Image (cartoon, grey):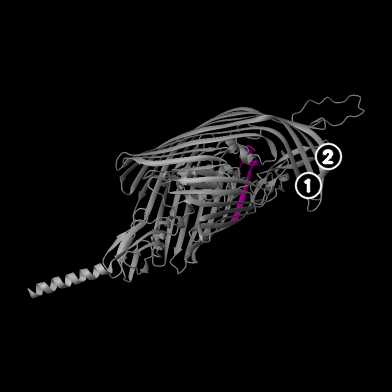
Amino acid sequence: MKKTFLIWFLILCAGYRLSAQGTASVTGRITDENREPVANVNISLRNLAGGTATGINGEFTLAIPGNTKIILVFSYLGFRTDSTELMLKPGEKKSLEITLHPAATQLESVEVRDHEARTSSFNRLNPKVVTAIPTPNASIEDLIKTLPGVSSRNELSSQYSVRGGNFDENLVFVNDIEIYRPFLVRAGQQEGLSFLNPDLVSAISFSAGGFDARFGDKMSSVLDIKYKRPTSFAGSFDISLLGADAHVEGTISKKFSYLIGARYKTNTYFFKGLQTKGDYKPRYFDLQALLNYNISKKWELSVLGTYSINSFKLIPETRETSFGTLSEAYKITMYFDGQEVDNYQNWLGAVTLSFKPRPNVRLRLISSIYQTFERETYDISAEYWLGRLEVYSGSDNGQVTEALGVGAFLQHARNYLDGTVFNIEHLGVYDREKSQIQWGIGYQHEDFTYIINEWEIHDSAGYSVPRPPDSVGSPNPPHDPFTIYASIKSNNVLSTNLLNGFLMDTWTFHNPSNEITLTAGLRGIYYDFNNQFLLNPRASVSLKPLWKHEFVFRLAAGYYSQPPTFRELTNLQGEIVPGLVSQNSLQVVGGSDYYFKGWGRIFKLGAEVYYKHIDHLIPYEVDNLQIRYYGTNDAHGYTTGIDFRIDGEFVKGAESWASVSFMTSQEKINGDWVPSPTDQRLNLAIFFQDYIPKFPTWRVNLTFIYGTGLPFGPPGAPKNEQTLRMPPYRRVDLGLSKQLIGGHTKFSPKNPLRVFTSMWIALEVFNLLDINNTVSYLWVTDINGRQYAVPNYLTPREFNLKLSATF
């Protein structure tokens, strides 16, 4: 009895002490470095019982003893364990804001996931960066233009050239389906939307050369895009002065998922800054959908469908352009009549059937059909006054002091293109213990009907150009026929078939001193247009020494053939040229990457040196975006250069990079070595992100591009006379954005804004320095036959306001 009484007495005393001590309350919210909430964080009391965990919004509530010093411990896998010390009075409430930082042990797992990227020629890019880059197009191609070896001189276009190649030498794939662009586009104003919808993208890979045998029959680059595989309902939208876009994604049961995106763009506001004033009516729209259905554990069906229409209408009115140097300045004033109406309509349908008979075997059958209907019509007449301009140093204005020429021209076009491209392809992958075998075989059929009717008349001071020689005083003056300055007229029908296949193997070797990855493959091509059969052997090796500092060395060599398609087969007269054979490129690429740590973060410094020898080259000319081929195989050439790139988080939590490229590209035509049309000796690109100190919801993005001038010359002049150089391309774009909704915001259960996970408003300044960049030239001729190159300038400084949200 005494023992029982003693026990009850101690329990009552403890209860009285706890009652006198009382409890306090701690609430809080836990986020990561990007201010995003972290769920399921374990919260415990050091050396005491009790604890809790955060909910989906990163919030928690915990009762703790009052008048007692306690230590709260916050722990979660992948983050450094944090703690805080508290001592609260009974009944007191305390609110905490805790930020968890990634644990250093994450580095090893990142290295494993990134192994393929580090040992191949491909650069992996973060798709989220596309939403941050300040450019008029907001496209994935704008991101590619900042990479080493890539150059572009037109912010209105999604086209780019890679290591001396032209726009037609780049491959683009979406989920292993080859993507095409409109064929007749000749200027960035007409091009409109790129095929790739950034809202739908989950992975971006890009190779500027030295790619494997599994990629198709082009000579310059590969852009490999993977679209998302949704696991839950989500979506986004963007609204700006340049248009709007939206997407939704989700699942229906566990077997079916959908991904749908729509975009609308109009550059009417943007084009008002161009030097040619008039009524611009550009309209660009596209709709894309990706549907996935899991038939069973081994079978899956995927359907990709797209439809796009880009229409462009222009009624030009006037233009004034000043050009030349301070000592020799000119000004041209032009008055227009007529209009241009262009329409580019295309659609793509693709079906992919995937079969996985065993865990290490993956088989796919891909079938796609692409159709394009393009219309290019214009009748534009112009009268111009050309004069010498007197300007003074430090002044932006001048006065015309001498008339040099008065003339006119009339341009006419009725061009129609209907094209169909059908593909069917089988791809397979077999994973073995130390290697991976890949193979594929495909068939492609093309049908094109191209009707071209272009002509142009020039007049100078009342004389048609070219004009007959003077015959003053002659009793029998010649009666030369009227000559049109330029004329192209043809009606072409082309039907071709192409077979291709590849086999490649990748081996990985590990030993105590290094890791070696070796890839070897063979690609075969048969093209019935010229009955040509080609074999393209390709191989690459990467070495990763197990040194204290991490290096990766790569070497790739291979043969790349590009069978002539509809564009290369059409010569300067608009005719299909029979007998043209494939252009071939022998490439050798060597590179290295050095991974180092700075400011507690990982950076990568990469360099690549390359040499490309090209034979059976089809010469061409470039005017803005229009490529016109000569229709011959009588040239060869080479391209060589070196690229550098450094990237990493210069500002914590924001990836940035800088790249610089040095290159020379030459062609030998008729015994003369001349620069190729894409011979850009130096190209520098910087993409930088930053957050305003103490205001993490404010973000600044900057893009800087500098490229030396490309060669050009008078129209119709021989290649050896087209050695003039355009001025350098210089452009700075700036974006300033504010996060309105994110991890830092809280809404009541009835607030309609609670459905949004993030919302940003951004102010973008395009061409911040207001530099006149030259994209091409308009050539005018005076009565004496002297030609003047009038530069066609790109967009001046413009502003854009954009609202973006995800839910």
Q: Main secondary structure of the magenta part?
A: strand
Q: Is residue 628 magenta?
A: yes
The picture places residue 422, in percent across and down from the top left corner, at 47, 33
Q: Which residue is mark 2?
A: 404
Instruction: Name the quadrant containing residue 469.
Output: top right
Q: Can see residue 168?
A: yes
At 45% from the left and 63% from the top, the residue drawn is 544
Q: Residues within 10 Å of mark 2 (few under 14, many from 20)?
A: some
The picture places residue 458, in percent across and down from the top left corner, at 76, 32
The answer to whether residue 39 is above or below residue 250 is below
Q: Nearer the viewer, residue 458 or 744?
A: 744
User: Callout 1, which amino acid?
Assistant: Asn
> Which element type, helix, strand or loop, lies under badge 1?
loop
Q: Nearer the viewer, residue 510 or 394?
A: 394
Q: Which residue is mark 1?
A: 397
Magenta stretch bounds: 617-642
Q: Which quadrant: the N terminus?
A: bottom left
Q: Residues within 10 Å of mark 1 (few under 14, many from 20)?
A: few
Tell whether 386 sits left or right of 630.
Answer: right
User: Callout 2, which amino acid?
Assistant: Leu
Q: Is residue 315 magenta?
A: no
Closer to the chain start, of discs 2 and 1, is: 1
> Which element type, helix, strand or loop, lies under badge 2?
strand
